Amino acid sequence: MRRLIQRITEDVDQLTDDERDQIQQAAQIVRKTRQSFLGMPRIHQPLPDPRAERPA
């Protein structure tokens, strides 16, 4: 894993400023999209049972 991180860091160092800016913008979009989905349930909560027991 450390080797992979080192390779990526070295490759990023070789990019132009414009290319780094593009990567940064793409990462921000992914983070923003992921944050909006993390708080949302994937399925709807079941509705309460209308036949629930009632006090006598």
Image (tube, rainbow, N blue to C red):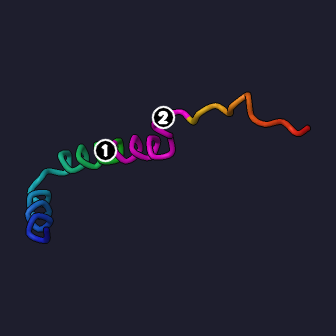
Identify the residue position indicated by label 2 in the image.
Answer: 43
Residue drawn at the location 50% of the way across and 40% of the way down: 40
Which type of secondary structure does the marked residue at label 2 adopt? loop
Mark 1 or mark 2, earlier in chain:
1
Q: Which mark is residue 39?
A: none
Q: Residue furthest top?
A: 50
User: Is residue 32 in the magenta section?
Assistant: yes
The span picked out in magenta is 30-44
Identify the residue position indicated by label 1 in the image.
Answer: 25
Three-letter amino acid code of the residue under disc 2 = Ile
Q: Position of residue 16 (x, y in %)?
A: 14, 50
Q: Position of residue 3 (x, y in %)?
A: 8, 69
User: Is residue 49 in the magenta section?
Assistant: no
- Local packing at callout 2 (Cα closer than 10 Å; few below 14, some 14-19, many 20+) is few
Question: Dividing the picture into quarters, in which one does residue 22 lie?
Answer: top left
- Give the distance between the C-alpha atoms of the residues marked 1 and 2, in whole angstroms: 30 Å
Q: Position of residue 8 (x, y in %)?
A: 12, 60
Q: Is residue 2 above or below residue 51?
A: below
Residue drawn at the location 17% of the way across and 46% of the way down: 19
Asked whether 43 or 28 is in front, the reply is: 43
Asked whether 55 or 44 is in front, the reply is: 55
Asked whether 48 or 6 is in front, the reply is: 48
Asked whether 31 or 15 is in front, the reply is: 31
Q: Quadrant of the C terminus?
A: top right
* Residue depth check, mark 1 versus mark 2: number of the one nearer the observer: 2
Q: Is residue 46 above or below residue 30?
A: above
Q: Quadrant of the N terminus?
A: bottom left
Three-letter amino acid code of the residue under disc 1 = Gln
